Amino acid sequence: MSRRLGLLCAVLLGLGACSSNNGDSGDGGTCVNATCNQQCIDAGYSGGTCAGGVCQCTGRPDGGDAEVGADADADADADVEEVPEEDAGPEDAEEIEVDPCAPPSCGPVELCGESTHGDGIDNNCDTRVDEDCPCGGIGTTLECMPGDPAACPPGEPCRGGCTRGVETCLEFEAWSDCVGAVASVDERCDGVDNDCDDLFDEGIPGCDSPVICPDTVRAAPMSYVPLDGGSIYPGTFDSWLWEFFCPTTVVTCPAPEDPTARDTQVMIISSGTYRARATIHEGTNTYTCEYAIVAQGQGLRVELNWDTQGSAHGDTDIDLHLHRFGTTTEWCTDDDCYFSNCKGSSYEWGSLDWGLAPTADLAACRDAPHGEGDEWVAHGSCYNPRLDVDVISCTTGVTDSTLFDFCAPENINVDNPPLGEPFRILVNYWSDAGFPGTSHATINIYCGGALRGTLGPQALDYSGGCEGDNWLVADVQFYTGPCGALDCEIVPLGTVQRGTAFGPPWSTFTH
């Protein structure tokens, strides 16, 4: 038996469901799913499943560790050298991991995943995520969830009212706390699956809530999201109020079209996890429903915000650029996707063709603001790459995201990025509009819908078209992860230059 399998078996021998053989058929003493699940339940866990021939329990009982069974410690001493939980580091975690694609469950130590830089999962269920794992570059991010991993299966939406947060790589290669996550809590009588077990209001005596609050809603950025109050509370009411809350990555938060109507909609421009709250008054009763709306695009999506955007802050014009791989000519050419050749309204006279197939489903671009969505519809598809939002000026305080004056982030999309061919991101200070101070730009990079990098704020002082301050942000390369999901690697560049030179050579990637 290998050492890494032996470590897991030492932890789970008390369940009598561990074997050195891989598989779950039950032949030759291998792990059996049904047996594993029942024995985990008997031991106080919520369930269990076989992964790599090993029984893995889900849901820690009363905050305890995964060493269940009276003989677990003795068996562990007999099989392998004991690794105390408080002393177990990333190297031990790597040896313990048997199958990175198996459903995660609570275990004795934190794991760092295939990348060794963290996996966004609270593997030991101590409410900290990747605390033993060095991160890979300041500003890079991972989606994360503290607590029982079963609430948010990898590659799938979270169950019930749970939503993932984001952890960010800080100085000294340490991960930040998991910010913005909504974890499992005790069930309440409110029509919500609070404990994220696919049931709601269960086990609460006398609970008869008339509210049925939806689980997390999935949406695409730049799309209309219905706020369907009729499905939440179909009865009569005296008043209704919708409130809409945006993630910290969204500078200007849009508002619902009619906040006092039971059924309305909101236009979401940016990626991220939003929250919608309905407050219903009926006679002397007040009901509330709050749920998450997760807006995720495809492939590569880059969003640009800056602090002098808008009429009250300077109304400067800062532009987003994306350079393709294989050429190092210059910026502001057709090797560079930017406002003069990459918008729906500029593709007609531009010559941008990077050999990437267009996206046939117009839902990815048809609602782009400032008239660009109509341009894509006229083209018949969403081109790749494309600049969906180019903001020259806007009015501070406008919350209707369908209006031309709404201060939206600029964004560039590549729905079907090639594998192994990096892109380079640049921010150009085009025009200061008479603003005398320093502007600060921030970039959010999304890969396969997940936020994978937040870089900046970067100071920009000189505006002068393409010859102004040019912030070389990062190189990004896509690859297929070990479980088949699209992922990316980001190398921050962090330099500012003037002029259109490409800059330093392409970064070297490990994938």
Image: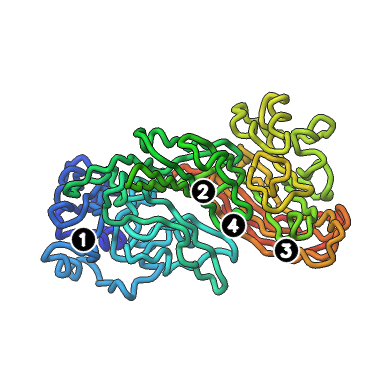
Label whose residue precedes the other's in the sequence (3 or 1): 1
Q: Give neighbour class at mark 2: few <14, some 14-19, many 20+ (Cα, 10 Å).
A: some
N-terminal of the pair, mark 4 or mark 2, is: 2
Amino acid type, label 2: Phe
Q: Nearer the viewer, mark 4 or mark 2?
A: 2
- Residue highlighted by disc 3: 440
Residue that numbered label 1 is attached to: 61
**Residue 12 or residue 45, whichever sits in front:** 45
In the structure shown, which secondary structural element does the residue marked by tag 3 occupy? strand
Q: Which label was assigned to residue 453? A: 4
Label 1 packing within 10 angstroms: few (<14), some (14-19), many (20+): some
Cα–Cα span, label 3 and label 4: 17 Å
Q: Amino acid at mark 4?
A: Gly
Q: Residue at x 51, y 36 (%)?
A: 264
Q: Is residue 23 visible?
A: yes
In which quadrant is the N terminus drawn? bottom left
Could you tell me which secondary element the residue under label 1 belongs to? helix
- Where is residue 12 drawn, in percent x and y? 20, 59
The amino acid type of the residue labelled 1 equals Pro
Q: Earlier in the sequence, mark 1 or mark 4?
A: 1
Marks 3 and 2, the one that precedes in the sequence: 2
- Residue shown at the point (20%, 66%) measured from the top left: 79
Q: In this figure, which residue is indicated by the disc labeled 2?
A: 244
Q: Residue at x 20, y 52 (%)?
A: 19
Secondary structure state at the residue bearing disc 4: strand
